Amino acid sequence: MIFLATPSPIGVPGAGIFSQPFLLSLMVWAPAIVALGIAVMPNPRGRYDTLMKQIAFFTNLGVGFLLFIAYNQFQNYLPTPQFEEKQPWLPAIGVVYHLGVDGPGMLMLVLSTIVGIASVLGSLGVRERVRSYFALLLLTQSAVNGAVVARDMFVLILFWAAATIPVAVLIMGWGGPRRTAATWRLLGYWGFGTVALIVGTMALYSFTGAKTFDMDTLLKTSINPRMQLVVGLLMLVAAATRLPLFPLHGWIRDVTAEAPVGVAVIVMGASSRLGAFLLLRTLIAAEPAAAKLLSPLLAVLAALTVGYAALAALRALDVRHVGGYLAMIPGGITMLGFAAVSPLGVAGSVLSMFAGGLSAALIVGVCAILSERAQTRSLLVLGGLAPRMPNMTWLLIVAALALLGVPLLASFTAELMTFFGAFKTQPIGAFAVAAGLVVAAAALAKLLYRVLFGAANPDAPGVSDASLGETWFLGLLAGALLWVGLFPSGPKIPGTDVPLFDPGLLNQMSAGLSEMASSYTLPTPTLPSQ
Amino acid sequence: MKNLVFVPDLLVVAAALVFVVGVQLGWLRRRRYLPAAAAGVALVAFLFELWVGATVGTYFGGAMVQDRFALFAKAAVLLTAALALATTDWQAEDSLSIGLAMPLLAAFGVMVAASAADMVGLWAGLELAAASATVLVSLRRPDLGLRLLVAGGVASGLLLIGIAFVYGTTGNADLTAVRSVLASVLPTLPLAIPVLLLLAGLAIRANLAPFHVATFTAELGASPLGSGLLLGVVALASALVAIKLAAALVGVSAVYAPFLEVVAGIAMVGGGAAAIAAHAPRARLAYLAVSQVGWLAAGLATHYRAGIGSSLFLLGAFAVAATCGPAVLGRAEGGEMAIHGLGVLRPARAAGLALAMLSLAGAPPLAGFFGEFAVAAAIAQSGHFELLAVGLVGWVLGLVAAVSTLRVLYIQSPLEDARRGGMVLPMVTTLSTAGAAALCAVIVAYGVFANPIMGLADQGAEALGLR
């Protein structure tokens, strides 16, 4: 409807064919339906294991195709959500099946799809109970997509909570030796976060008296700053358990170390980014008074998270633990952008959700593959692997550079925007985060030196380089980081401003962002009248 | 059309009598088709109820009433009975004829309570449902049957004393009249005592913690269907009676609301915590059911239309999962080892058990989650955030327990025959497979089609005169 009501800037071939209200539902429910199909498919003695893997891969590719269409038809000059679907679901309590996507939502969908494809490729080595594994992986992806496009708090909670169970079962069923502890920790922390989210939502529902969970009403009804603060704190707790932020990060070490590679990638790449996305929707965009009051706390959490993660990575002797701790750093940077409560900082945070998700997935994936290929996780044993693992060497270097935000990678643009925004309003916090990044650089340098360039250990087990599938999935994550870093506004036909096939993630991301950050725009100084 | 309203009631009673008498007298020879016939009767009654049940009216001089509340409750119990009869492992039951008849009679008891317009009708319906379950328990374990009879007697006594006191105070047994009299009465201690006695009696029947200890051993020791009836149908009957009484006593809600809040909190957290500690699948199911009954009570404690409508909506989801959970588990009722790898050995039953357990734990996106969320919204609207927080803690504990069972069902490898010992797997028949698949579909569809179902539940609460 929105598509028809607004003028189209350019006559895009095929425009309008996917504006019918089913596109987002298809992206959310298709993986779930395929998962159910896989789960009931007969698979005597694993005869169709390869077929299951292919089905999961092509389902992800299909979702990717739908996203490509939506991405290209997305009108980034509109501040309102697009491809909206709205049906009453539980009218007695005001629940609406309301889906829609705006700029940050589109960015999260792109992230979720890339990470989804990478996680399936990273799981090709799974040999046990293949049917159940891929069914659960697809359910996880479905839940993440659902949480991203939800425009009703009930729908958001539904998918947010639904993502927990398949991830927990995946870790418990296919994880490493300490998988049981990892599962309970994940359930405990994520469950606690979900409780905070539900209580926060219910508080909002009760305080506003809106009698609806639709975000368009619930998050736009004004409440007094004290109530905003209570709701904001609850949302912060929910976000901190997912992203994760210090001190609610207790699950990350065990989960990233024990989960199978594909699961670790989807958890760190997409599921955990939902924490930042939730904070954007419910605090930054909806409760400006609370966001301003909480901004010093956000800055402290950002600094503590980056500092703790860097120090813990420096001290850890298990390569997968190092990967897990380092994967916390992008979350801290995203939080710093929110703490800035300025348009530039918020924009940086949104881009950092994407870049941080890819970086976190990449470092966790590289560390996991490295430990598998080197047959040990101990940094005391690993050494001098660069000549024997050229692919992994490059990928580990790209992951390290992405975490530090060096130019030519997407994280550079994100960190630049975040720090420029934050140094204005939260200089101490920004300085502390920058100091934490210096320690992180030291930790990464130590890791690279020890694992790749140090002296080879003659007693270490034999090593082999990443397989083609592993290189592909890690390369996909690295490639996406490079692509957005090189072409943040999309590639153009030389000599013109006409986009080739990608309108640019930065452009798409901006749809609706200025409205979200409008409360934080500083007043324009006026000249004294003469 | 008006006179057809009681056809579903007549159908289930007639079928129950035919199964008891017919098998005893040798009229029904093809015994293998009898479970399908019983499930078919309940299904036809369910469809008939949906068709003719929308006709609103009063019957038997105002003693029975057919309204949206009765329609919702009757449809819920008939669907539950149909699914339970279809999924039951009949090799694990002690008597086919009694096993077929008792769920139908229990359903009839619930239908009587749902239509009752006075307190006597409520009591009669509840006792009929409870007696049917007691018969099934006694078949396997007479000692537990006796224990249940004593506990039931105490519950019934408390209920009757409470009813008598309320009758004495208001001078009327009719629910509408009680409601109008109490609307102008201030809550006093002499009124509070009978109301609390009423609730205590109902709490024993409904397995509301800590009163569940009275009947819990019987639930664990009964046959699968007997356990399902006790956990699901009898609790459903008690909750329906509680809802009707709460609507009638809404004028003195200050008397019962604090009591319900406390026991709801205990049930929600206690049930979840005990479910984690329990390892036997049936005990875990039972504790999860206790936890969900806590949510039902929390909805009642709000004593508003939104809360009671939400409780009614959750009640439908609860009845299906709590009754069919033990039934689908069948003979695999020993310790946790009995269901090791059930996902491979009995995929349909394992899926039914997993979904029933997840629904009782309130896992999204299943029936129980939708119901619990609706209750949570009502609790928030009434401003009881402490109760909401306690309930959500119980919810997380329940989820952890349910995930533990998923691990055993799907991740543990099946035991070799030598290690299985006396533990028997549930039998597989076409009916049980179809029943388990239907159970899965109902638990999933309850959330997907929440709009019409919740709408009906809300109309049911409105029919009780709540605002």
Image (spheres, grey):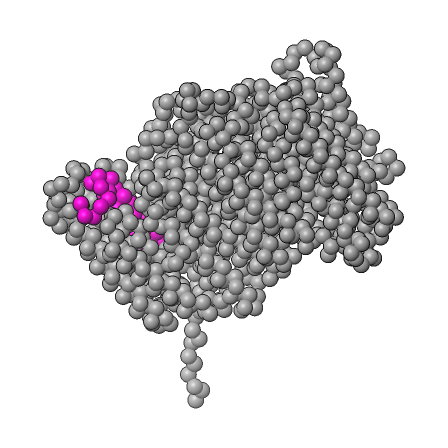
Q: What residue appears at the point 68 percent right and 52 percent down from the top-left corner?
A: B259
Say whether residue A371 is left or right of residue B348: left
* Magenta stretch contains residue A372: yes
Q: Which residue is drawn at the image coordinates 19% and 43% (left, top)?
A: A391
| B329 with respect to B252 (left or right) | left
Main SS type for the magenta part?
A: helix
Q: Is residue A155 above or below residue B429?
A: below
Quadrant for the C terminus of chain A in the image: bottom left
Relative vertical location of residue A41 with respect to residue B207 in this rendering, above or below: above
Q: What's the residue at 68%, 33% (across, down)?
A: B148
Any magenta on residue B311?
Answer: no
Instruction: State the extent of the magenta-drawn residues as a range.
Output: A354-381
Give how far across and how far down residue B419 sits, in percent. 42, 23
Q: Look at 38% across and 30% down and name the residue there.
A: A129
Q: Is residue B209 left or right of residue A480?
A: right
- Closest to the observer: A459 or A398? A459
Q: x, y (%) of residue A450?
A: 17, 51
Judge by depth and name the residue closer to the eye, B18 or A160: B18
Note whether B217 is above or below B85 in the view shown: below
How many discs appear? 0
| x, y percent for residue B84 | 62, 28
In this view, the residue farthest toward the front is: B143
The image quarter in which residue A34 lies: top left
Could you tell me if residue B266 is visible in this image?
A: yes
